[in-house]
Image: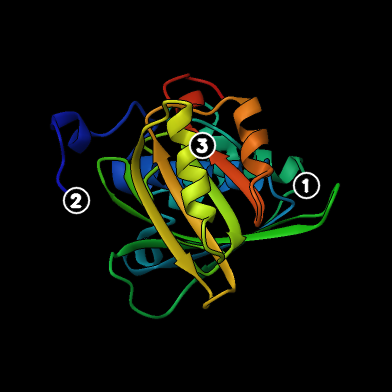
Amino acid sequence: MRFKDVFSIIGPSMVGPSSSHTAGAVRIGLVASQLLGGVPDQAEIIFFGSFAATYQGHGTDIAIVSGLLGFATDDYRIPQALAIASDRGVAISFEQGKGLFSHPNTVKLVLSVNQPVPQQLSLIGTSIGGGNIEIVELNEFAVKLTGNYPTLVIRHADRPGVIADLTSLLKSESVNIGHMSVDRKGRSGDALTVLELDAALSAPLLDTIREINHVQTIYTVDLSQTEGTGTS
């Protein structure tokens, strides 16, 4: 990744000690909680590479849980995140994973909620420096999601015209696409499309997207709603 300015290297306003091992980890947790739609009831957190070797000393475990609770990178409650999660009844496990990934600061999250409808979400995220992140896998689909822009994630059937209908709708609403990634399980199977946008989408527009043929589920991510707030 090429950094655009010195602030991309220094990192965001944060509770330390490290922009990559703390702030980046918080942002991975935040993305996961927004995709899930709230705080999980259970969280399995598996660290790889440098994360696995140093997560306790650098507070990466605390940082991930802070993000899952919806805390911003500069939230004063970050040091107490594990105790807060326990008080809220969140069951958390930490593991050191085995295997190689393209980046040493890698974590896999397997999250679930029990109510009102049981659901599970898994993702793999990397913290690439300066508080910047990339989500590289979501529910076993290969993706690219940075959290730097309002993001729309759509699970849909792999059918002709779905993406064309979607992009035409966004064009009609003057919504610009900064980046798009698409992955599918197989021809005519399920697909996942990730769109990083220049602006967040309105609730009515999201409702219209849900009505597109073959769209199954949509998720949104917008870290601008939490970052730099001092509290969550």
On residue 89, the disc is 1
Instruction: Residue 17: tell me if it is visible.
Output: yes
Identify which residue, 230 or 160, lies in the foreground. Answer: 160
Picture coordinates of residue 50, whole percent (x, y): 31, 64
Disc 3: which residue = 169
Mark 2, secondary structure of its residue: loop
Identify which residue, 122 or 42, lies in the foreground. Answer: 122
Q: Report the coloring of the rendering.
A: rainbow
Q: Which of marks 3 and 1 is nearer the N terminus?
A: 1
Tell me whether the residue at label 1 lies in contact with that at label 2, contact meaning CB atoms closer than 8 angstroms: no
Q: Does 90 sit left or right of 95 as displayed?
A: right
How dense is the environment of label 2, judged by Cα within 10 Å: few (below 14), some, or many (20 and up)? few
Please name which of the two marks, 3 or 2, marks the residue nearer to the observer: 3
Q: Which residue is drawn at 38% across and 39% down?
A: 23
Q: Residue at x 52, y 41 (%)?
A: 30
Amino acid at the residue labelled 3: Leu
Picture coordinates of residue 148, whole percent (x, y): 36, 36
Q: Does 52 sit left or right of 202 as displayed?
A: left
Disc 2: which residue = 1
Amino acid at the residue labelled 2: Met
Please name which of the two marks, 3 or 1, marks the residue nearer to the observer: 3
Q: Is residue 32 above or below residue 208?
A: below
In the rendered view of the protein, which quadrant contains the C terminus?
A: top right
Mark 1, secondary structure of its residue: loop
Residue 14 location, quadrant: top left
Q: Which of marks 3 and 2 is nearer the N terminus?
A: 2
Identify which residue, 75 or 153, lies in the foreground. Answer: 153
